[in-house]
Amino acid sequence: MAIDWGDSTKRKAFRDALKDVYRSDTALKIFVDEELNETLAEIAGGDNLREIVFNLVDWAKALDRLDEVYQAFKALNPKHSKIRELEQQPLVSLTFNLTQDEWDALFQLFLPDDFADLQRAFQEGFKEALGIAFRQAQPKSNALVELTQIREVLESYDTGAQGPVLAVRFVECAIAELRRTSDRQGTDRNLTALEQWRDRIAQQHNVPQRSAELIKTASCHAYLLVALEDCGADVNVYPELHITGVEKPIPFGANPTTCAVDQVADHISEWIRLAEETPEIQQCEEEEVTLELFLPCRHLDEDVATTWMVKDKREDPVSLGIHRRFLVRSSDRIRDRQIQAALKRLWTELEACVAAKTACDKFHLQSDCPQSKGVLLALLKDGGALGLKFVAQLPTDPGKRADLLNDIIDAAIPIALWSSEITHASAAILKTEFDTLLDQACLTNFADLARQWRRQRMSESAKQIKLLCDRPDRLPKLPDPNREEDLLVAS
């Protein structure tokens, strides 16, 4: 039976079938080599399996070989559940509003670093066009983690009268997000081509344009708070799930536990899965839960991004820093009322400086290592700093290093940056990396700050950056240390 490969839903179903059967690059490579007599790496590259499969189908469609690939797959997997879906013909032939050339012209205007903005723009545009959040409309869909997936969904909705409305709303929201990012970074990005694309499509399909106001910054984010407190050689671990704008934690089936530090990542893997299956979280515009780790002082300088191994949805081990957006906060600050009061005052100042685009000017630059305990604390307090950029080598002596980190904690500054290793990067390079992170991130939006920090760590010179940040709200509820029964958290 001939399949209409011009129907993007058919291509998506086939891609899903390929990923379901060939779950590794090697398995897909064997299929392509034996059935198509081609070399996978030469015809379909990519950073992950989803991208490789997309490029394989795209390559086959461009060369009119998609039927050949499908027949080879069907011969090997005749009872696969997607076969019936692929060969089922629609009762009404679907007509699409936009051509592939128009979609190509749009997505060629985006840059690789635009993805976070486009992710938010898609969620906002979808809700405006259809009156419902994407996760509510497609509760079983996977998170949109690549630009090709956003395009794929947009194309699948490009039928009937509603199709061009979603495309126009997406581009309107993209322009607003990109403009806000450009303003925050102090750049002057030319968005004329995007505006012209929007105007042309809106005019051709009689889509009324909305006002050019910026997208509201108070988008809904989900945060998984995991607090560690020392308990002898082990740690007590307390999980809590929050959504911005909701005062109380969201129940999600996770309980406190006591374990060795190197076992915490195993629990985090399960808690992430439970959190992202929670109905309240699935209604958020942001589809990925941001992890906030509250660590005791002695663990603040550990490289948890690479040494903590969590499990992805396929149960494969992956480093925390790659798998998850996360931030490090201080569990020592939670119980200290004096620090919390100071942090609340400084956070208000930080928000005002972020709005005025002067926040980075309020970060104290420390280019050498204080020789005495309390020196850095005094500098931060007397200087009115809102943050710290520490570009000196930390003390090798564990006691002195702990003193320095305690100074940073007690100063109550909202954000501190340092590096455990400065052997591969000079202080000048490290300072540049710090400044880049602070300039690119929205410092008062922890989801965006975590996203930018993960992106920054991908570079060789910035992979050792440590980031400690805190805010006076969204704190996990810890047991009362004066009530013995509260401290018995492990079953």
Image (spheres, grey):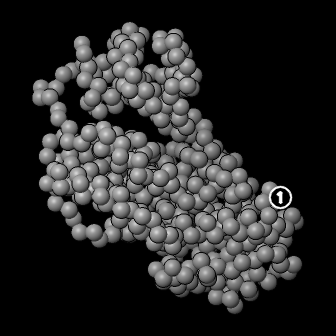
* Left or right: where 355 falls relative to 467: left
Residue 167 x/y as whole percent: 26, 50
**What is the quadrant of the N terminus in the image?**
top left
Residue at 46% from the left image edge and 55% from the top image edge: 114
**Mark 1 lies on residue:** 423
Judge by depth and name the residue closer to the eye, 151 or 381.
151
Residue at 20% from the left image edge and 46% from the top image edge: 163
Instruction: Give the mark count.
Output: 1
Residue 255 x/y as whole percent: 50, 52
Residue at 48% from the left image edge and 35% from the top image edge: 51
Residue 255, compared with residue 376, is above or below; it is above
Q: Quadrant of residue 362?
A: bottom right
Can the viewer see residue 430? yes
Give the amino acid at mark 1: Thr
Residue 256, compared with residue 312, is above or below; it is below
Q: Secondary structure at mark 1?
A: loop
Judge by depth and name the residue closer to the eye, 399 or 482.
399
Can the viewer see residue 248? no
Residue 261 x/y as whole percent: 68, 51
* Left or right: where 160 falls relative to 286: left
Furthest residue toward top = 75
Other-residue count near label 1 (Cα within 10 Å), few / some / many at <14 / 14–19 / ≥20? few
Residue 489, compared with residue 475, is above or below; it is above
Residue 41 x/y as whole percent: 56, 26
Residue at 64% from the left image edge and 79% from the top image edge: 363
